[in-house]
Amino acid sequence: MVQLNPFVIEGYLSPEYFCDRVEETALLTRHLTNRCNVALIAPRRLGKSGLIYNCFQQENIREQYHCIYIDIYDTKNLNEFVYALGKGILTALKPKGRKVWEFFLNMLQSLKSTISFDINGNPEWSVGLGDIQAPDITLDEIFAYLEQADKPCLVAIDEFQTIANYPEKTVEATLRKRIQNCHNANFVFSGSKRHMMALMFTSLSRPFYHSSSIMGLEAINEQTYLEFANHHLARNNKEISAAAFTYLYHHFDGITWYIQYVLNMLYTSISDKSLLQEDDVRMAIDGILSQQRFAYQALLYQLTAKQKLLLIAIAQEGKPFSLMSQEFLQKYHLGASTVQGAVKTLLDRDFITQDEGVYQLCDKFLELSLRAG
């Protein structure tokens, strides 16, 4: 039998492989069972989706609700949003049995002719984006299903701030109205761009103003994470020293995904050492960067020379507050016009982020790779 690596880096397995978040899980569960919508705001890769799935696995949630999760990060317009929502609902309902998913499909009159079935009679989301001719009508049908479903529904929409960039300028109002009139479903609006999410949910002029309880996420407590790591490393007769874990934890600012990735590599390390030290962590990180080298080269090839220079400067600096300060410009031999022209592209294409006045790379491994040269 293949041994499972307990340090999950994609998706969610079970509470056993989910580190801590006991209080956050309890709070999110309490909000949803009290029929409150939630805006969950935290940087990417800190564990928002894992928290949502962990909440959905709680016994009082799992047995009594239809739990639906969609990620709209890659959507560009209302059509694609409707596509993702419909597909997400069908995916969640398929394991519940024919009667459950058939009721949903019967509500989708605008798409009924485009749904196909496999050889076992199970439905497949074979809808093409071009099949959604009238997204508002299909959205009405989806919300009609949510309102009439045999169980209350919990719908988590990840990277929710994406809708603010759709060309259709009324999407926020459109969704807010439908959600407000849907009494059989509650929503988790999860987002990583804190400034955009804060504006959406706290600005008086925006449709979602005061529509949801706002939750933030902080990094998992270092000591708690160390205990979790050693609990699972022990299965492979390994242990990580407190000093080595402190190095790992702070090297990635406590961001869950990067820590999990390195622990995943350490768990399967061919080293016969039982006590992992800081050098082992460094070697694991170097190995990851080596694996990613060609992918990062291809990624950087998409940038102009000036954009690449600015990206490298931000990586070298770490977390600059100002890209236009004389000190920063002189240190990295950049012109003000170069920075002004490049920064928007880097932000728009998610190479960098600006949060609470600080610029930094979105990908910590790419940042380390650029620092290493």
Image (cartoon, helix red, strand yellow):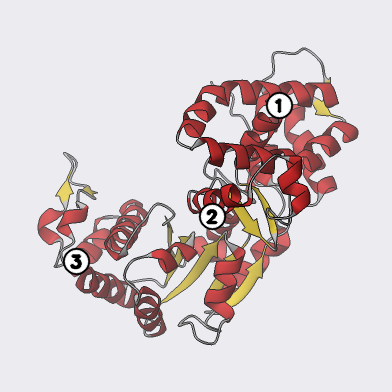
N-term mark: 3 or 1? 3
- From the image, tell me which residue sits under label 3: 108
Please name which of the two marks, 2 or 1, marks the residue nearer to the observer: 1
Expressed as whole percent of the image width and height from the top left, the position of residue 182 reads 37, 81
Q: Give the CA separation, mark 3 to mark 1.
A: 53 Å
Q: Residue at x 13, y 54 (%)?
A: 114
Q: For numbered disc 1, what is the local secondary structure? A: helix
Drawn side of residue 105 relative to residue 150, left or right: left
- From the image, tell me which residue sits under label 2: 53
Q: Nearer the viewer, residue 360 or 48?
A: 360
Q: For numbered disc 3, what is the local secondary structure? A: loop
Expressed as whole percent of the image width and height from the top left, the position of residue 355 reads 66, 60
Drawn side of residue 245 relative to residue 196, left or right: right
Q: Quadrant of residue 282?
A: top right
Q: Give the CA separation, mark 3 to mark 2.
A: 26 Å
Q: Amino acid at mark 2?
A: Tyr
Q: Amino acid at mark 1?
A: Ala
Q: Nearer the viewer, residue 150 or 307?
A: 307
- From the image, tell me which residue sits under label 1: 372
Drawn side of residue 370 relative to residue 248, left or right: left
Q: Amino acid at mark 3?
A: Leu
Q: Residue at x 54, y 56 (%)?
A: 57
Mark 1 crowdedness (10 Å alpha carbons): few <14, some 14-19, many ≥20: few
Mark 3 crowdedness (10 Å alpha carbons): few <14, some 14-19, many ≥20: many
